[in-house]
Image: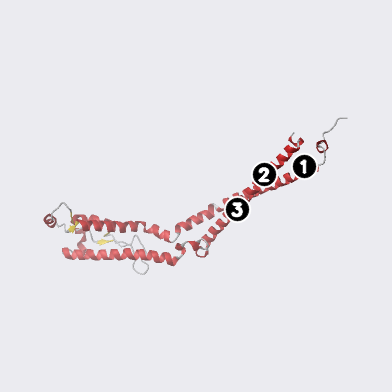
Amino acid sequence: MLLYWRPGFIILILCLWILTSVCWFLTGFDYFLHTFADDACSAFEEFVRSPQNSSLGSMLPCINDSFSGKLIAEIGSTIHSFIVELNSNVSVMYRLLGIGEGNGELIGLRKICDPFSGAPNYTYVSQNCPHDAIRIGDLPKALVRFTCRGEDTIEECRKNGKFLPFASYNMAHAYSRSIQDMLDIYPDLQRLTKCTIVKNKAEEIVLHQCKPIRISTKLLWASIMSLSIIMVVLVITWVAEALRCTEKPLSACFKTPTSR
């Protein structure tokens, strides 16, 4: 019955125009979403094919092999030098105690494990340690038997062969624990500096997520665009019908069949 009243017909057309405008707005937004997803997937695909020459790789300093290699080598060199110096101090301690290095098991300490190769690369190999070497994190366990506790007198410590001051033991414990923590995270640090985590995640996105996202956003954009076109055609048709009926009475525009 609304079509028999011109004000109601005009209000209906206005509502359809508003709905059509909303549909076109959603069409533009969906098109932007589809374009953004497509560009993002293209960037990930380019990154997977050639990380060094991709636009995404230019934003990641770890893609530069020389940068990451230099950083890892510098860390390895620092730890390697520290352990080498520590082993030399252990040898000095053997001489002071009059113990041969072959009898290091008498004090529970023979050599500190050095998992790094020499210069220039300082490659990390966790299995690079001899069987008689201990981890640097276990150094405090070997030193504790020679540590003079604060409650003991100097004479008691000398009598019991505890020549290491407690403050020095705490310092050795802190250093060895820090180096051991660094060695524990070193493999993860290597993967991080070489962007291995980023590369694996990019490959996962390209293989499992890009295709469904592209298809879904394209279908969403196409369906909303089709609806928008249908709404435009419908509104134009009704407006044309309204203009045709402007100069005519309602009875001429909306004829009803008469019985003979």
Residue 224: x percent and y percent?
A: 65, 47
Residue 197: x percent and y percent?
A: 45, 56
The residue at the far right in this view is: 260
Q: Nearer the viewer, mark 2 or mark 3?
A: 2
**Rendered image: mark on residue 18:** 2
Horizontally, residue 22 falls left or right of residue 196, namely right
Do the numbered discs 2 and 3 sit on residues whose CB atoms are within 8 Å?
Answer: no
Q: Nearer the viewer, mark 3 or mark 1?
A: 1
When asked about the image quadrant of residue 46, the answer is bottom right
Give SS at disc 3: helix
Point 72% across, 44% down: residue: 235
Q: Is residue 105 above or below residue 221?
A: below
Estimate how packed mark 2 is, as few (under 14), some (14 to 19) or many (20 or more) residues with alpha carbons within 10 Å. few
Give SS at disc 1: helix
Please give the residue where the numbered disc 1 appears in the rendered image: 242
Please give the residue where the numbered disc 3 appears in the rendered image: 32
Tell me the quadrant of the picture where the C terminus can be found: top right
Looking at the rendered structure, the kind of residue marked 2 is Ile
Estimate how packed mark 3 is, as few (under 14), some (14 to 19) or many (20 or more) residues with alpha carbons within 10 Å. some
Horizontally, residue 244 falls left or right of residue 85, namely right
Point 21% across, 64% down: residue: 101
Mark sitting earlier along the chain (2/3): 2
175 or 130: nearer the viewer: 175
Residue 48: x percent and y percent?
A: 52, 60
Q: CA distance from mark 2 to mark 1?
A: 18 Å
Estimate how packed mark 1 is, as few (under 14), some (14 to 19) or many (20 or more) residues with alpha carbons within 10 Å. some
Residue 63: x percent and y percent?
A: 46, 63
Q: CA distance from mark 3 to mark 1?
A: 36 Å
